[in-house]
Amino acid sequence: MKKILIATALCAAACLLSTPARAQSISFTDGATLTGSLTYDATTNTFTQWNLAVTAGNDGVNNSFTAITYSNTIAGDTCAPGGFNGAAFYDFSCFSATGGDGSPGFQGRTLSLVVPGVADSSIAGLPTTPGQTTQIALVTNDSTLASQASCLGLQPVGAAPCSVEGQSSGGRALVQPAFLNITDPSCATGDICDTMVFTSTPMNGGGGNNSVPEPGTLPLLGTGLAALVGLGMWKKGSLAIFAS
């Protein structure tokens, strides 16, 4: 009996170890990671809560980023739609008033994100019923949508870079795989709210956009909050950084 119990325990442990872990973070070009979630109110097109943690990184040349948390609980932090990247995309950004490197004299730091959508008016692929979970892919400089979203050339005039973080000394870009798992938790207020969580794991092994929900992931996704927002405070100077 002891042998059977031991064998059963070993089998259970092996099964747990063999289950692939879902990576609840995405990466930058310098190896740093972005983890977190946020809540998006689709009725008012606003981000009501966000908590995004970014690790420190350095590109090995002259651009160094310290660790930072973008949060609605930090004074001066904002998250909102902003910029323009064409009619088929939705830009949103989070801004920290004190997280930058301070050179020359500007302490701001911006996390700018792009997803499929309708020109800063709606996000494509949002869940349509309470409890449903969908997944959309971030538009990054190394994604197949980069040229359509003008990630590299910053055209048309006023277009924002695609899914990057910038401060006065320069910027760094997010890279694939990068997704948002989006769940509709049913708002008590009657508004259409969604919670978004960053992940590098495609749902059901697919490519990302509007994937069928995995039943096993729904309880986990329900605990997360939404990601990706916009910045009405994306400065023209920040665009110049990425254009240079």
Image (spheres, rainbow, N blue to C red):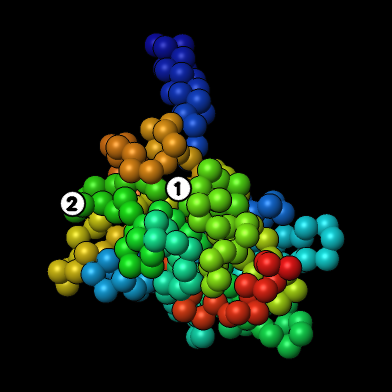
Looking at the picture, does residue 146 appear above or below residue 242?
above
* Residue 133 shown left or right of residue 136 in the figure: left
Looking at the picture, does residue 13 appear above or below residue 82?
above
* Residue 199 shown left or right of residue 225 in the figure: right
Q: Tell me the element at label 2.
A: loop
Looking at the picture, does residue 103 appear above or below residue 126?
below
Q: Image point 58% across, 57% down: which residue?
A: 151
* Residue 106 shown left or right of residue 77 in the figure: right
Residue kind at label 1, given as amino acid type = Ala
Mark 1–mark 2 Cα distance, whole angstroms, equals 20 Å
Residue 15 in view (yes/no)? yes
Q: Which residue is mark 1?
A: 137
Q: Image point 57% across, 64% down: which residue?
A: 155
Q: Nearer the viewer, residue 129 or 156?
A: 156
Chain-order first, disc 1 or disc 2: 2
Q: Image point 64% across, 69% down: which residue?
A: 166
Horizontal and vertical percent position of residue 83: 48, 72
Please identify the residue farthest to the front as the structure is shown: 156
- Camera-side mark, 1 or 2: 1
Q: Which residue is mark 2?
A: 129
Query: Image quadrant of residue 61?
Result: bottom right
Residue kind at label 2, given as amino acid type = Thr
Q: Tell me the element at label 1.
A: strand
Q: Image point 39% across, 56% down: which residue?
A: 88
Residue 196 in view (yes/no)? no
Q: Nearer the viewer, residue 12 or 110?
A: 110
